[in-house]
Image (tube, rainbow, N blue to C red):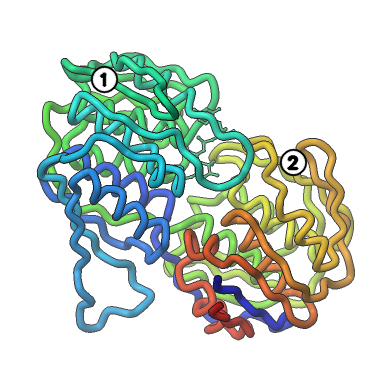
Amino acid sequence: MDSIRIVGGERLEGTIPISGAKNATLPLMIASLLTSDTLTLKNVPRLADVTQLGRILGNHGVDLAIAGKRPGQRTSDGQTFHLTARDVVDTTAPYEMVSRMRASFWVLGPLLARCGEARVSLPGGCAIGTRPVDLHIEGLKALGADIELDGGYVVARAPKGLAGGRVAFSKVSVGATHNVLMAAALAKGETVIENAAREPEVGDVAACLAKMGAEIEGIGTSTLRVQGADQLEGTVHTVLPDRIETGTYAMAVAATGGDVLLDGARPDLLDNALDVLRGAGVEITASNRGLQVTRNGGEVAPVEVETQPFPGFPTDLQAQLMALMSLAHGTSTIRETIFENRFMHVQELARLGANISLEGDTATVTGVEGLHGAQVMATDLRASVSLVIAGLAAEGETVVNRVYHLDRGFEQLERKLGACGARIERLSG
Ligand code: UD1
């Protein structure tokens, strides 16, 4: 299994290109199940999760063609995917596939809407607490689906097709919003989704579905009003930039000191996180190319943060913020309100010398003078990258094991950081 070796202490300076968002790419790829036409996605990141989902969709009958490199194209430019589900050949998503990537559970709504039936395994995915799917099921039932659980599978039927309905989620869920939104795009009549997730990736999917022929009002708000279409058409859609990647590199720059342009980043996608970083003493300037992030010698100030659905501080940046706050001048509190048990990085950060105590859903981080390199390992994507950030700031050598987590969600991580002066390399093993 590969690992990443970092020799810390280098200041990051230069430009990091921001990739297309993983969390938009995955549901956009799944949206290809809704039409027999070709859906073309641009700015698709090269990630293990994307490759894996391509395989899973292939199983359902989606033909994926990846456009070749054009002259003048940079290696950092996103890929172009042509996805065509001319016929859906299989409406079962088996355990072996869904357990490897939770987002593949989101095929449920589209398969049901298009074929009138779907049999999808209950998911696995990142080991960050129990992650139920009750909201997905409740939402699809409101569109007329008949759903039962059978041997670890969600079996859904709507022989006469789905019909619009009112879905009022009791809790904000990104995945359940995607699932119901995609299904509603092919349901008869109007669906109203209340307490919908407002994450920009949901907006990106809604914008794509609108181009495919669904009428959608309220994009970017917590109430989505969808007029389903009898048939959806193909379209061309460019995936929005990855706000989590952006925030991650901003924190890496803040942790090491440095001056980096995050090329292509969109500040409006991570308002709150940028405010938190500014509050910590990091200079952030938006330009038409992206975000310039600078910390020149000044101390990192402690923060008080709690994770919230968008537009609040994202849970997907919580671990990275904790790595940064390990070096702050003072004590920070970081409360995780979205996922139980999303603190696996705490004990690994402690191996690098961080001083963090945990009580319930709150971490108290007392900044230390410096971190020192060690062997570490993480069990989820964002936790892994927090260890990379800590390793970049630590004195000496850090080896992050189980790199496959990073490969699921960060495109060309070593290359991007290496180009800004980080001493980072992949060790194959
Ligand atoms: C998505 C993101 C993930 C991010 C998360 C929250 C993708 C591929 N993944 O995950 O990176 O951390 O949003 O921003 O986009 N819940 C229920 N019942 C349900 C569904 C969810 O109780 O049926 C709960 C979850 O356990 C969790 C909360 O709702 O506590 C939010 O989860 P959700 O927004 O659904 O996360 P995902 O869509 O899985």
Q: Which residue does the image show at 56% across and 67% down from the upper left? A: 403
- Kind of residue at disc 2: Arg
Q: Residue furthest front?
A: 151
| Image vertical order of residue 412 relative to residue 195, above or below | below
Label 2: which residue? 335
Badge 2 local density, few (<14 within 10 Å), some, or many (20+)?
many
Give left or right: position of 228 versus 77. Answer: left
Q: Residue 362 appears at what percent x and percent y?
A: 79, 40
Q: Judge whether 15 appears above or below 80 on screen.
A: below
The residue at the point 54 percent across, 77 percent down is 414
Q: Nearer the viewer, residue 332 or 82?
A: 82
Query: Closer to the camera, 169 or 217?
Result: 169
Q: Is mark 1 within 8 Å of ligand 1?
A: no
Answer left or right for 27 relative to 164.
right
Name the spot of residue 364 as percent of width and height, x first: 84, 48
Q: Is there any visible trace of residue 145 in the rendered image? A: yes
Which mark, by number, is residue 236?
A: none
Expressed as whole percent of the image width and height from the top left, the position of residue 169 reads 48, 21
Question: CB under 8 Å between callouts 1 and 2?
Answer: no
